[in-house]
Image: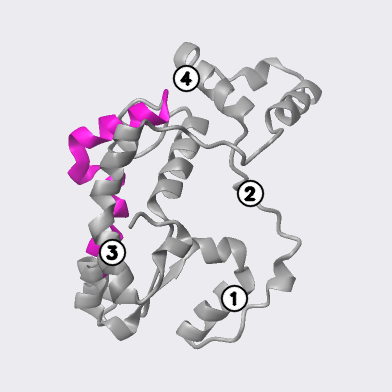
Amino acid sequence: AERLFGIFPDAKILIIIRNQIDTLQSMYTFMLMHLGKNINLSYGGPSVQTFERWITEQESFMSRSFISTLNYYEFITKYWQLFGREKVTVLFFEDLVSSPDLFFDKMADYFDVDEIDMNSNKSVPKRNKGASSKELFSYRIRKGLFPHQSFSKYLSLFMTKVWRRYLEKDVGSVRHELSQDTQARLQDYFREGNRRLQEELNVDLAEYKFIL
């Protein structure tokens, strides 16, 4: 925030947030699909073999973990202090998914630009489709047994496509499980900041499934 303010002190800041549990689920899936490679070590140093282990190992270096970046109240407050509240707005990823037209109308209004025509982008395919349970199982096996092997080079293009179609069935339906103790620790970590943010924004964060 300080560096941005030093370069662009008159900038208008848009911050998009998503409830923390869904964000952790998404980041873990992303890391697992990349077999834990080429990821900032502070986000992925811990094991990606299970969601539970990834979370608990991050807790040993919480101050520089991915989890800590989801303390929204803390970093949004910094932007308010530097740029002023009138130059910082917060939108929700959940609205982008459920009501994209309304989301982009809010964004266009904030930046005082022409409305964004979502119909012109209907032909653009969704690239981040999540992962299926079969894919995640395959990634875990590869990560554990063959972390440096790419099997696609041993298969024909046809077989690779068949294999991908099989793995991609039920894409986006996976939820990673956490123990009740770990869930409770995450709730304790995020609750107070979320309550303060809810009060400051005057928005019902429970609508977006934030921890409160």
Residue 17 placement, left or right of 93: left
Residue 16 in view in this figure? no
Relative vertical location of residue 71 with respect to residue 87 in this rendering, above or below: above
Check if residue 196 falls in the magenta segment. no
Instruction: State the mark number for residue 127.
Output: 2
Mark 2 or 3 closer to N-term? 2
Say which amino acid is labelled 4: Lys
Instruction: State the mark number for residue 195.
Output: 3
Instruction: State the mark number for residue 102.
Output: 1
- What residue is shown at x 56% (from left), y 65% (from top)? 96
Q: Look at discs 2 and 1 and give the one toward the viewer.
A: 1
How far apart are the alpha carbons under marks 2 and 4? Answer: 23 Å
The part of the chain drawn in magenta is 49-76
- Measuring from the top left, give residue 56's x and y in whole percent: 28, 31
- What residue is shown at x 77% (from left), y 20% (from top)? 156
Task: Sort mark 4 into few (<14), some (14-19) or many (20+) by Cα contacts within 10 Å.
Answer: many
Task: Sort mark 1 into few (<14), some (14-19) or many (20+) by Cα contacts within 10 Å.
Answer: few
Q: Give the residue pinned by disc 4.
A: 143
Say which amino acid is labelled 3: Arg
Q: Look at discs 2 and 3 and give the one toward the viewer.
A: 3
- Measuring from the top left, give residue 106's x and y in whole percent: 52, 79
